[in-house]
Image: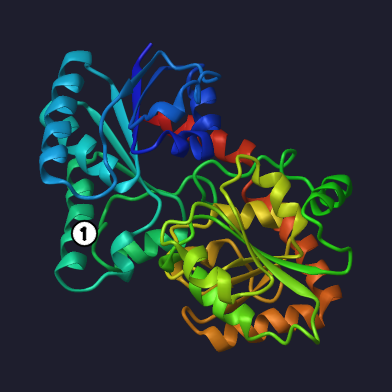
Amino acid sequence: MKKICFIVSSPLTVTSFLKGPINELSKSFHVFLIANFNSSDSGLLSDLPLKGVYNFKIVRKISFVKDINCLLKLTYFFYKNKFDAIHSVSPKAGLLSTLAGFVSFIPVRIHTFTGQVWHTKKGITKILLKNIDRLIVACATKILVDGRSQLSFLKKNQIIRNKGLVLGNGSISGVEIKRFSPSKSVRVNSRKKLKISNDEWVFMFLGRLNKDKGVIDLIKSFNLIDKIKYNCCLYLVGNDEDNIEKIFGPISPKVYFLPHKKKPEKIIQISDMFCMPSYREGFGVSVIEASALEKPIICSDTYGLEDTVINGKTGLKFPVGNILKLKNLLEYSLDNKIKMKKMGEEGRKYVKRNFDEKYLIKAWKEFYLSI
């Protein structure tokens, strides 16, 4: 069997997006994995049919000494093991592995773009990060992009010219429709545990809590809502990367913070409206997961979310960074709950037609067999 090695910065990338593809590809190939593991990741991937799992210090932030050291080790590792293909997901993993693969003569070097950090940057930093993406493209033999609007964005910014392919209708591996299925009992029990009353309208964000995700804008918009007129609350679920809870929590009544959940299909069900006010987004997997659970969406009009929401049918869109417009949409949903329910139902139909996991996994296998 031919050998494929996946390279990611964090093993959470595998648990969130790559389990389905790895399970399917392992039927036809020997699959290996490289990631930056820490002590809390023990046993995290024990259920996957991997032929080998290796720990390399692929750090997220730029670190010249650590990155050069990792690049040299990867180059030697690739040369020694002679993989038939390497496949990276995440920017730093992409930079280091495509360079190492190019130098060590790996015949097939694949990278998947899942978003562009440089989109919200300025000056020298933006120029540097854009050129890193161009270098990844130059060293790779195949480029995958997890959304059509993102592919257009990359071409517009001259990151990609001839290369670039979207599997299926987008997303990395789609949504497991059966797992992300609405359940009245899950909703009732979960809301009961959190002491949420039956008539309280719950807005929710799920993802990394930082400025680029628009979380601060969401809190500010929610704080403008008349809480006497509207019985509502906001739940922010995810890892707080910018200490947002310490800054805004004390001055934001009815705003609640929850840590990252391993089972989004359960926590999302407490909500009535899912919000993604991001400044940059490669695709927005949590959006289609929420839609699969029949949650109407409020999201920004950033390029990556173009594929995930049909404005006016499965959700509502507002201009990136416009706090007042976002506040107006939050209030509109509160005033039009029947319409919102209909949007949620249409959202699940949209996801089943376009992002069902079984279609994406089939596309993964066909892609690999073709090369």
Mark 1 = which residue? 129
Q: Is residue 12 left or right of residue 108?
A: right
Residue 311, visible in the rendered structure: yes
Q: Residue at x 34, y 17 (%)?
A: 3
Q: Residue at x 44, y 63 (%)?
A: 210
Give the x, y percent position of residue 157. Answer: 27, 67
Q: Amino acid at mark 1?
A: Leu
> SS at mark 1?
helix
Give the x, y percent position of residue 319. Answer: 51, 82
Q: Is residue 17 left or right of residue 81?
A: right
Give the x, y percent position of residue 313. Answer: 71, 71
Q: Nearer the viewer, residue 139 or 267?
A: 267
Rendered position, 334 above or below 140: below
Q: Nearer the viewer, residue 101 or 326?
A: 326
Give the x, y percent position of residue 164. Answer: 34, 50
Classify the position of the N terminus by image quarter: top left
Q: Residue at x 36, y 29 (%)?
A: 37
Q: How packed is label 1: few (under 14 Cα within 10 Å), some, or many (20 or more)?
A: some
Q: Is residue 2 left or right of residue 261?
A: left
Dividing the picture into quadrants, the one containing residue 152 is bottom left
- Total marks in image: 1
Classify the position of the C terminus by image quarter: top left
Q: Residue at x 58, y 61 (%)?
A: 308
Residue 277, visible in the rendered structure: no
Rendered position, 227 above or below 371: below
Specify the color scheme.
rainbow
Q: Residue furthest front?
A: 250
